[in-house]
Every structure is written in C-alpha cells, then in structure tokens.
Amino acid sequence: MRLRAALLAGAAALGVAVLGGAAIAQQRTTLNVGMAAQDVGRLDPHFAVTTIDRVAVAWMFNGLVRFKPGSINPAEIEPDLAERWESSPDGRTWTFHLRRGVQFHGGFGEVTAEDIAFSLRKAAQASTSAFSGDFRAFESVDVVDPYTVRIRLRENVPSLLGLVTNYAGGYIVSKRAVEQKGDAFVRAPIGSGPFAFASVTPNQSLELAAHEGYFRGSPQIKRISYRFIPSDASRDLAFQNRELDVNYGRAQATWVERTRRLPNVIVDVFEPAELSIININTKQAPFDDIRVRRAFAHAINRAELVRWRGEGVAREGQSLVPRGYLGFTADVPLLQHDPDRARALLAEAGHPNGFTVRVVHTQLPEMLAGMQVVQQQLRRVGINLDLQVVEHATFHQQIRQDLSPLVYYGAARFPIADIYLTQFYHGRSIVKTPTAVTNFSHCTMADAEIDAARVETDPQKQLALWAEAQRKLVEAVCGVPLFETLLVFARHNSVDYGYELKGSMSLGPLITEATRFR
Amino acid sequence: MIGFVVQRLIAAAPTLIAVLTLVFVIVRIVPGDPALVILGDQATPEAITALRARLGLDRPLHEQYFEFLFASLTGDFGTSLVTGRPIVSEVAAVLPHTLDLTGAAMVIGTAVGVPVGIWAALHRNRAIDVAARILSLLGLSFPVFVSGIFLLLLFALHWKIFPVIGNANLADPVDRIHKLVLPAITLGLVMAAYITRVTRSAMLHVLSEDFIRTARAKGVPWRAVVWKHGLRNALIPVVTVVGLYVGILIGNSVLTEIVFNRPGLGKIIVGALNQRDYSMLQGLMVIYCFLIVVVNLITDLTYGLIDPRVKHA
C-alpha cells in the first residue's frame, strides 16, 4: 500500500514536472541576447555607430527598402516601407510609393511621406546625424502626397537604394516622436520595426517589446532582453547556463570550435567581413620611397595571419576593398610574401640594416594582438615597429592627427566599393584636412577613377573604373591588406531566426517577426 | 557631536573643490574627443564640429569650468554627453546595487577578517596562525576575476544554485539577496584577507603593551583582558583601515560588477572613461568624493564609540 502510494506520488510529480516543462517550453517568448558591451549609446538610428547600437536599432526600425534578412547582397534589396519605386532615365530623380497603414510604435501614428522626408533630411544634416556625409549628393527630398516621396540628386550615386535601405542613415524615424521627445529620443526611440523600445537600464539591459501592429505580422517573439555583458568569460558561462539564447561570439577559431562542441548550440559565422589593412603614409619618410613600401608589403605573410586568426573566421585580404563588395576585384598587383626581396629592396633604398619606426596603436586586445603578429613579421626583414600603445579613443584621435606613419585599421562598410575607396583612399578624405575621413595614406592617384565611377551609369564601365582604382592604389602600396574577419554569433538550436543567416548589415542577427523558439 | 559633524563637513568643502578642479582638468587632459567617440569613425569634420558645439565643448575652458563648479555645488550634474540622460538618474539607477555590494562585502570582510585576525594573534606562530596567514595571502593574491569565475563555475554552472547574470530586481528582496551572495563573497574575501592581517598585527601590538601585563598581574581573567582591554585598543587601527577600505571597495567593485554582470558605479565610470563622457565622469567623481567624505566622517565618529578618550569637540 505504502509502495503504491509512493509510486503514485512519484508519477504525479513526474507528470507535473513534464507538463510544467512543456508549458514552460510553450510559453518561451522572451529572447535573451548577450552582447559584449558596457551599455548602449545612442538609439537614434542616425547616431547608432557602435556595433551594440547598430544591432539593436535594426530590430526597431525600417528603411524604405531593406536587405533580404540574412543577406548583405545589394542585388537582393527588397521593398520595406516603400512597396514600389521608380527612377528617372538619368537616375537623378527617384520616386517611392509607400505601403499604407504601417504604424509607428507607441501610438505615434501611420508612417507617411512626411516622416520619410523628415528622416532623410535629418540623416543628411551634420548636426542631427553621424552619417550626413553619405547623403552629400541629395539635392532635395519632397513630399508628393501622403504616400509618395521624391528624392532629387545633384549627381548620380552608385546605389541610391543603398542609402535608403535599413542601414545607417536610411532608417525611418517618426517625425512627431523626434519633435515631441527632443533629446530624449536618443534613449527612447520610436520606429516602425517588429520590436519597440520598452526600457533601458544603464549598464544592464535594453528591453524591447513586440510591435503587435507590425505590418508584416505580429512577431512570434514577444520580448527581447538585450543584455550588456562586457566580460567574455561571464557571457560564455551565462550562454552555457542557458541564461542567454543568443551570444555575441569571438572571431577566433578556438572559440568557434569550443562553442560548437557544446550540446545543441549553433555558431553562425557571417558577412560582412571586416578588412584589416595597414595604411601607409606615403608622404612621410621613409615610406615616401616606394621601394620601402614594397619591402614592407613583401614582409607581410597573410597566410600566417589567417592561420593565427583561424581559418574558419578569417581569410586573406586580396585588395584594398573587402571581397564580395560590389566593385571588388582580386585582379590587382598585390605583392606576395618574400622576405628576401623585402631585404633587397630595403638595402636598395638605403636601409641595409633596416630601420625603426614609431607607430601609434590601440590597446584593444584583438587589434593589438594582430599588430604584434605583424610586428614580428616585419622584424624578420629588419623593420622594427616601436608600438606606442594608447587607449582606443586616444588612438582614434591621434591617427586623425596624422601622428602615425602606419595605421592598422579594420572596417566593414556598405558593400559597394565606392564607400571604402572614398573614405580610405580619396584625396578629399585625407586626415587633418577640412573634409577628412580616414585617408591615412595621403594617396590621391585614384581620385579620378573613384569620382568617375560614382556617377557612371553604365554598370560595366563603373566596375572597370573601380577595378582600375584598386589597381593603382595597390600598385602604389597605399596600404597592405592583411585579412578579413567574419562576424560570429552563437545560439541555442531552439532559436530559429526564420531565415538563413549568411550576412547582416547591422552586424548582428536580425530578429524579425518570423524569429521563434522551436 | 553635531558641532563636530558640521565642522568636518565644512573642512571637507575645500577638498571637494580641489577634487572637482582636478577632475575637470584630468578628463580634459586625457586625449580622445567625445564627439568623435559618439559619432564614430565615419563622421565628417563638419559633423564633429556641429556636435562639439551642441555639447558645449567648443566654449572656452574657464567658462566650462565655472559652470561645472557652480552646477556641481548646487547638486546639478547635468546630462550625459553620450546618452543625454540626467546624470543623477543614471547614478540613482545603479547606486543601490553598488551600496548593496560594498555594504555586503564590508560586512563579510569585517565579520570574517576581525575574528580570524584575533584568533591568529592569540595563537601566534601556531598552526592556526600560519593557516590564517597563508589563507589571507591567498585572498590578497587572487584577483577577483579569477575567484569570481571560479565561484560561477562551481555555484552557477555546476550546482546551479546561483545565476551567472547577477542583475537583481531591486524591488524583490529575495532576488536582491540571491544575486548578491556570490559577488559579495568574492569582494568580501579580499577585504577579509586584508582585515585579518591588520587585526592580527594590531592585536599582537596591543597584547605586548604594559597595561595588558599589568591587567594580567592584577589577576584579570585572560578572556576579559583580550576582549575588554586588548580588542578595544586594537580596533582603532582596524576601524581606520575598514573606513579607508570602503573607498577601495567602491573602486575595486568594477571587476566584480563586470564578472557577475551587475550594474554599478564602477561599471559606469569605466564606460564613461571609454566614451570620454566628461560630464558623466565629473558627476561620478563628485558623488564618489562625497561618499568617501561621509565614510571618513562615520569612521571618525566610530572612534569615539570604541574609545571614550577620543573627543569630538
């Protein structure tokens, strides 16, 4: 009798546990995402410049058009807030027709042409956007009627759709919310995406709630808790302990392999890759001598760098534009690893015993480790780098003051060659000039091709111009490409993004209305 | 007593102004432009100039200084350059977490450190003393990011008693304590190691004094000699160290906060420094300085409770 009672009690307990477990599984609607960061910064999408901010704003905002989820291929851009568009034969006037009935979060009303015009004008203005430089070619943005907006350009741009996509300055904000909230908008934004801002706790988390009125349907995930966990070890432990469903990963083969060995875990390695380049100041001795720059390039062993970084997450740089970008070409005279040739060139240039050069570099661990590998490679041919390691913000300030003849820089940009070439190798972008961006090499020899390609309407001619620009820059050794690093995120296999994650311009997985728990 | 408190607060005013001035100068000497940090690496000089003007960073330094000084003294710390939110509310959101952690660590550090230190002193050069010294050395040698991760591996991952993510719901006392245990132990044990050594040393010193010998010669029981005469006198340096250690605790708490993913003042300071958030750094330093002044005041008042010979007025 006692045994039977015990068995019955045990079965009941088991039943409760199983049913309870099933109920919990069914109820799982909060997605916990771990991010390697201290805090979010500015959630106004036109000021979202850090990875942590970019990942989050992509869940809250739409563009006129969007990259197909999981892709960064400009050829796969599809309608978002605009259901269709057309352009004039000269490519300078674009008309977008909006979907009707798309609602902003928090009762801020319907998305109209007024909001589109306001957002694009805001994105183009230096005082209200970090991406104003991208919209230099915009002449006007006019409201034709509540559901039609017209953009006029001063000159052709390589991809107008690229500028109005769900990326950087292309995000659409609620005009009424910006005007009503003022400065508070940067930490409590209003968009029209699948998730709405709910709250932010400094140094802790950003909470987002499903936008039930989302025009593509109510999201299956009802809440996102975006946790800021700067310690890699703690974040990994939290992920292992299933306190996180999605985890920001480290772009290291050892981390990827170790994480893939965990049960029921998927590691996504995706585009866009960040291309690391050593930019060489061609106007400063001893690098004003092309033989020294060539010696430098011959001393770099890209294969070794990729082995160090891990072949699953890195690949060799092939040009001064990341591979896969529209306009990229591998058909460039890239100098290969040849230490003997490097030594001979140095001797020829009057440096038979090599030389020492002072270089400013960041203390960010991943960038510092990469530079230390390069430092060892250069030492083998007699080039000694005297690394002045400074804090990251100081590094950014000092390299813009032209204080370092060599600048190690890793960056991913909108996947069209024009952006990379203009920002890093156009004369207008030379540091310490009124129009400076990030041209550390002071190279100007490809300006004509870059400018011509930007306004060229024939796609084949445009590609040829970009290829020619890359050839000239590589030949002059304005920079030496090192390696490209892909993005890494891990998730438990219970998380289904609803698409195949091959790329994401927001630098993190896009959480859409289709994302769900399996 | 009140007169003493007022006198000390008035004496703290020049210190506070000196700290404010130093903070203002230091955050501006450190290279790195807040506008560039906020706008990112693709920003144009035009956008950077516009933002600098909007943040008031283009105004003459003396103007910025006097405005900051006046605002700080009236309790207005302004808004964060990065988030645009009032600094007071940013700090108020995390201050309870920091006070919880430092308070609990101080309780653990004192509750463990003082008895172990006394015990070790009373058993000088015996196994107990040697063990206490070795353990305190270990406690001081282990950085919190090692001991913290070790505790997480054991109690969160293996036994699943505590969570890895320690951001507690302040409105829920059970959750608040549950998520405080591991971080408080991690931080508290370092303090305990330090207090053990100080207490042991102070006790050994006091126990070798003439008045202790006299008390024993008069036939006062050993227990009374230790507790009434020895400990009371040894506690003055211990209290001084505990008071000083509170400042160190607030500073050291940053690593604990990072390992256990707890919000807190330390994490905000690191974030503000990385982002060159001048106004946030200035505000935090003023609050930090104020906390130190208050703790020192409490320490001074405690002297009077331990030793009536210490007069406050």
Image (cartoon, coloured by chain):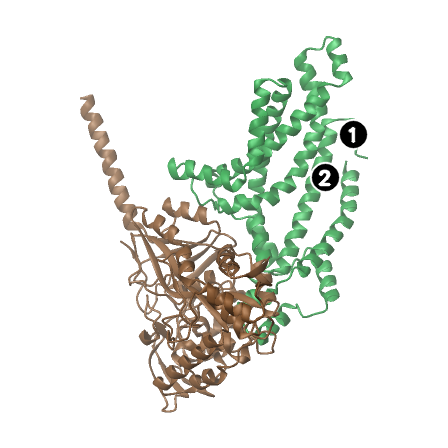
Chain colours: A brown, B green
Q: Residues within 10 Å of mark 1 (few under 14, many from 20)?
A: few
Q: Chain of mark 2?
A: B
Amino acid of disc 2? Leu
Dot placed on the residue nearer the N-terminal end, 2 or 1: 2
Question: Under tag 1, what secondary structure?
Answer: loop
Does residue B154 sit above or below A129 in this rendering? above
Question: Residue B167 at what x, y percent from top left?
Answer: 48, 46
Does residue A474 sit above or below A269 in this rendering? below
Residue B206 or A454: which is nearer the viewer? A454
Question: Under tag 2, what secondary structure?
Answer: helix
Q: Are marks 2 and 1 on the same chain?
A: yes
Q: Quadrant of residue A237?
A: top left
Regarding residue B235, the answer to whether it shows in the image is yes
Q: Quadrant of residue B249?
A: top right
Q: Residue at x 57, y 18 (%)?
A: B127
Find disc 2 in the rendering and name its residue: B297
